[in-house]
Amino acid sequence: MAADHPTRCGFVAVLGAPNVGKSTLINQIVGAKVSIVSPKVQTTRTRVLGIHIEGTSQIVFIDTPGIFQPRRRLDRAMVAAAWGGAEDADSVLLLVDAAKGLDANTRAIVERLKTAGRPAVLVLNKVDLAKKPALLALASELNASGAFTDTFMVSALTGDGVGDLVAHLAARMAEGPWHFPEDQISDMPQRLLAAEITREQLYRQLHEELPYAATVETESWEERRDGSVKIDQVVFVERESQRAIVLGKGGRRIRALGEAARIELAAIFERRVHLFLFVKVRESWGDDPERYRDWGLDFNA
């Protein structure tokens, strides 16, 4: 790199209430799926790094779980991971759903940012779904808090306004070497990403029937000589009745889930994928410390 164009690098934490579009924004910026997306809140369980290069700047985005009032152990661990991501980052974005406006979760996040003295960049998302007067009023109310240095209005889904946000962040990264190779877009291991893609299909296809009582693990990963990969995964549920829901009549549901996940994995990994799904009952998987270690969460948060 020429001396008059030094490299820059930094970490940007993307915070927000559940389901405001954090994963969609990071996938849009990175240009590939690194974090799963679902209409269901609390889809993101772990901190996911999405890596983007803008000019001479490498921006490492931390997609955090949605911040809300936790009720269960898993909730507490996810919220702790989100705030941990903010503390570790060089910059913080607060993403707000402009179509929904301010809710109690977002107000609480703003208050905590103010208390911590942590200036953030305000990003109003889904502006294509909001009326302009309401959008301007929302921006005015949030900026009156004094918690934000800049405001951007974007649609993470369409990409509108995202380029301006990225350019702003790139210019503010500190000078220094890049932390990741130029062609790397995430730090998530392939086995974990594969499990997350299947979990996304569970949420999409069983949105109402199977709330949060399921998780997916990649049990084995076998590289084939023909360049393809064989992946065995287990869907863990808490009750036998949930196992029946995932399997479906005559196994139809599990086949549909597997086929949808296989197609997406083949596109992501750019190779043939042989995916085999199994469903097992594990009553207290949500209280198993090993699960939390796998997700990079603090079991005792």
Image: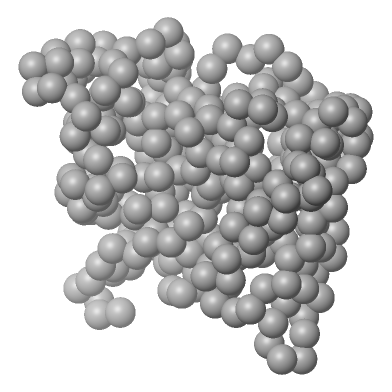
Q: Nearer the viewer, residue 283 or 191?
A: 283
Residue 128 is situated, as x and y percent measured from the top left of the image, at: 19, 34
The C terminus - image quarter: top right
The answer to which quarter of the image holds residue 203 is top right
Report the residue at 76% width, 20% height from top: 73
Residue 209 horizontal side relative to residue 130, left or right:
right
With respect to residue 276, does 207 lie above or below?
above
Name, please, the residue furthest toward the bottom.
Answer: 226
Residue 99 is situated, as x and y percent measured from the top left of the image, at: 26, 23
Report the residue at 36% width, 45% height from top: 25
The answer to which quarter of the image holds residue 55 is bottom left
Q: Nearer the viewer, residue 234 or 93?
A: 234
Q: Nearer the viewer, residue 51 or 32?
A: 32
With respect to residue 15, does 229 lie above or below?
below
Report the residue at 19% width, 25% height from top: 130
Residue 144 is situated, as x and y percent measured from the top left of the image, at: 20, 11
The colour scheme used to paint the residues is one colour
With respect to residue 244, does 146 lie above or below?
above
Residue 258 is situated, as x and y percent measured from the top left of the image, at: 69, 57
Residue 17 horizontal side relative to residue 120, left or right:
right
Name, please, the residue furthest toward the top.
Answer: 104
